[in-house]
């Protein structure tokens, strides 16, 4: 290499001295750092370039293995190897030096074989050196696994079946050692999972991986994340879909049962993970069970004041929540109701949202919505369906977050203020949208909710539908289907869709009504309840229904029926 300072012998001597300085180092990062530092301090810049491959190979080959988190990250800015800067004769001399450690032999042999595929002996020595390091007791098993993965990569490119088999055997040995060493204080579930994933990728026998996964799963029953990941891998090894679904269903149901022992956000988070996994794997029954349990979570399950409230929320958010609640306590009754009723997400139409970036899961899984009776009510079949599903998922998550912090507790604040009850009663009596019987049903729903009874909220769903029909008539929108339609009258969803363009500044409310009452990707309360898919309302369902009623009462101004859009409800 002509650019090196001095002749080739000088360069070789400098390199051998550098290897001598790190020959006893056992950890890859330490050895690389020491070598690079030595070269920078004692050699010309061209000599540093000689071993750029050291900093390049600190990273595992992601293209060759299903590794989600490569153990070593690329460390040096100059780590992109240009083979034109490498003196392969000097590198070969360094790898063959009697003072070179296993780490140096493995690393240089891998580097040379990457650019000189005729260096068979050096590549074979590199595999053996990697395997020696993968058995080094001074290294953690996760480091041993990473070195074994490097050994297989070189052996695969070398086409050496014996060494590939040796690598697979070492991966299994690492798993066995990790299983035997498992204790509450020293769990190595991540090592077991990654090593078995790579073992299967390397062509290892699925029966071997299956047996070890069944050994490992009982050890991690309390670690829901590892249990789910191990169960997913185990299910992927089965010969039939029935066997695969059975294994995964068993462990997901166990996680649903485990969620019942948790509180607040921890319970919700675990159930949502189970629900997402069940949906992605097409396990309709399990998804229905998770949805049902999730829907039964009440605000009382979240102990905000004692622990999770302070833990989950930063000071700014907590201050905003307290200020909102204080407004509900101190504002004039009509204004307090209006403040509470208006607290919903924007429910923006797709044209007003940020462009959606498709994820890998969107392409490999069939997205489906399972209603609370366990029946599939929606299945994405196009990019537009996927985008719609993800937007609704975001809206639901945001509403439920606001419900937990301010909407649910806020309603109780209002119902405990006698002057707010009076204002509510007066509005119900004066509203042209409700008959006397409908107004009485609505009043009973509010008072029953204060007493902890959510069922009367379901009785006002027909009253809400009648009120929306009255709004449509006021906007001169026909409530009838075209001649020949399956039904004489439009469905509630059809009425809301026709009404939204006429609502002016209140279109956001219309989109909320649609999401809450009739959208199969939203809460869909009216359809699920009146069609028998939902036999009992949840606490959240009741609050949503009462919020829709409150919006009709306190956010809109009503006028006698006229033919002008100017008389339609506005914020």
Image (cartoon, grey):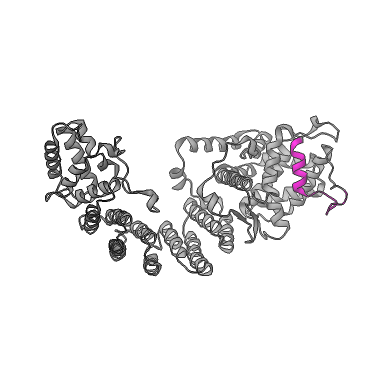
Quadrant assignment, res 366:
bottom right
Q: Looking at the image, is 195 positioned above or below residue 569?
A: below
Taking the magenta stretch, the answer to whether it contains residue 492 is: yes
Point out the residue furthest to the top here. 566
Q: Would you say residue 112 is visible in this rendering?
A: yes
- Could you tell me residue 409's position as x and y percent? 58, 45
Quadrant assignment, res 7:
top left
Point out the residue furthest to the right here. 483
- Could you tell me residue 126's position as x and y percent? 23, 53
Taking the magenta stretch, the answer to whether it contains residue 551 is: no
- Could you tell me residue 565's position as x and y percent? 80, 32
Quadrant assignment, res 47:
top left
At horizontal 59% and vertical 62% (from top left) the residue drawn is 284
Position of 267 with respect to 208 (left or right) is: right
Q: Looking at the image, is 348 positioned above or below residue 186?
A: above
Of the pair 383 and 269, the residue shown nearer to us: 383
For the N terminus, which image quadrant? top left
Magenta highlight range: 483-501
Position of 365 with respect to 461 (left or right) is: left
Q: Would you say residue 460 is visible in this rendering?
A: no
Position of 303 with respect to 2 (left or right) is: right
- Could you tell me residue 321's position as x and y percent? 53, 38
For the C terminus, which image quadrant? top right
Position of 259 with respect to 541 (left or right) is: left
């Amino acid at each position: 290499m002509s650019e090196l300072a001095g002749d080739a012998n000088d360069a070789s001597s400098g390199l051998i001295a550098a290897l001598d300085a790190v020959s006893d180092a056992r950890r890859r990062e330490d050895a690389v750092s020491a070598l690079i530092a030595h070269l920078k301090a004692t050699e010309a810049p061209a000599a540093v370039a000689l071993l750029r491959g050291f900093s390049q190979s600190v990273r595992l080959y992601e293209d060759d293995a299903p590794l989600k988190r490569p153990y070593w990250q690329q460390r040096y800015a100059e780590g992109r190897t240009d083979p034109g800067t490498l003196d392969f004769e000097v590198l070969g001399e360094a790898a063959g030096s009697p003072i070179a450690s296993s780490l140096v032999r493995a690393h240089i042999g891998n580097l040379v074989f990457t650019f000189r595929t005729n260096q068979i002996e050096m590549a074979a020595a590199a595999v053996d050196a990697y395997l020696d390091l993968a058995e080094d007791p001074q290294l953690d098993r996760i480091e041993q696994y990473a070195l074994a993965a490097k050994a297989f990569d070189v052996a695969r490119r070398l086409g050496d079946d014996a060494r590939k088999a040796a690598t697979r055997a070492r991966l299994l040995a690492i798993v066995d050692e990790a299983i035997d060493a498992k204790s509450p204080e020293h769990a190595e579930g991540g090592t077991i999972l990654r090593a078995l994933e790579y073992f299967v990728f390397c062509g290892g026998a699925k029966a071997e991986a299956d047996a070890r996964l069944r050994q490992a799963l009982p050890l991690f029953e309390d670690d829901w994340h590892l249990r789910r990941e191990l169960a997913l891998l185990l299910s992927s090894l089965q010969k039939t879909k029935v066997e695969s679904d059975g294994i995964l269903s068993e462990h997901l149901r166990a996680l649903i049962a485990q969620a019942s022992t948790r509180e607040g956000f921890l319970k919700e988070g675990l159930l949502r993970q189970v629900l997402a996994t069940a949906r992605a794997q097409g396990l309709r029954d399990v998804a229905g069970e998770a949805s049902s349990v999730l829907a039964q979570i009440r605000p009382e399950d979240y102990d905000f004041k004692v622990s999770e409230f302070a833990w989950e929320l930063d000071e700014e958010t907590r201050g905003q929540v307290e200020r909102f609640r204080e407004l509900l306590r101190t504002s004039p009754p009509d204004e307090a109701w209006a403040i509470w009723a208006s607290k919903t997400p924007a429910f923006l139409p797709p044209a007003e949202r940020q462009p959606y970036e498709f994820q890998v899961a969107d392409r490999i899984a069939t997205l489906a919505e399972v209603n609370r009776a366990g029946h599939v009510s929606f299945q994405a079949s196009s990019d537009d369906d996927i985008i719609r599903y993800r937007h609704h998922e975001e809206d639901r998550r945001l509403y439920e977050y606001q419900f937990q912090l301010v909407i649910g507790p806020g309603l109780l604040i209002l119902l405990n203020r006698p002057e707010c009850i009076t204002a509510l009663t007066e509005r119900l009596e004066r509203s042209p949208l409700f008959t006397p019987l409908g107004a009485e049903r609505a009043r009973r729903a509010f008072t029953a909710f204060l007493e902890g009874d959510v069922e009367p909220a379901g009785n006002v769903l027909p009253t809400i539908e009648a009120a929306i029909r009255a709004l449509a008539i006021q906007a001169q929108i026909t409530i009838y289907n075209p001649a020949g339609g399956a039904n004489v009258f439009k469905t509630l969803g059809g009425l809301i869709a026709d009404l939204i363009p006429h609502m002016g500044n209140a279109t956001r409310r219309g989109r909320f009504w649609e999401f809450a009452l009739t959208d199969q990707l939203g809460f869909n309360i009216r359809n699920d309840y009146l069609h028998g898919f939902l036999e009992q309302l949840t606490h959240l369902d009741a609050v949503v229904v009462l919020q829709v009623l409150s919006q009709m009462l306190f956010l809109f101004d009503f006028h006698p029926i006229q033919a002008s859009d100017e008389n339609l409800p506005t914020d």
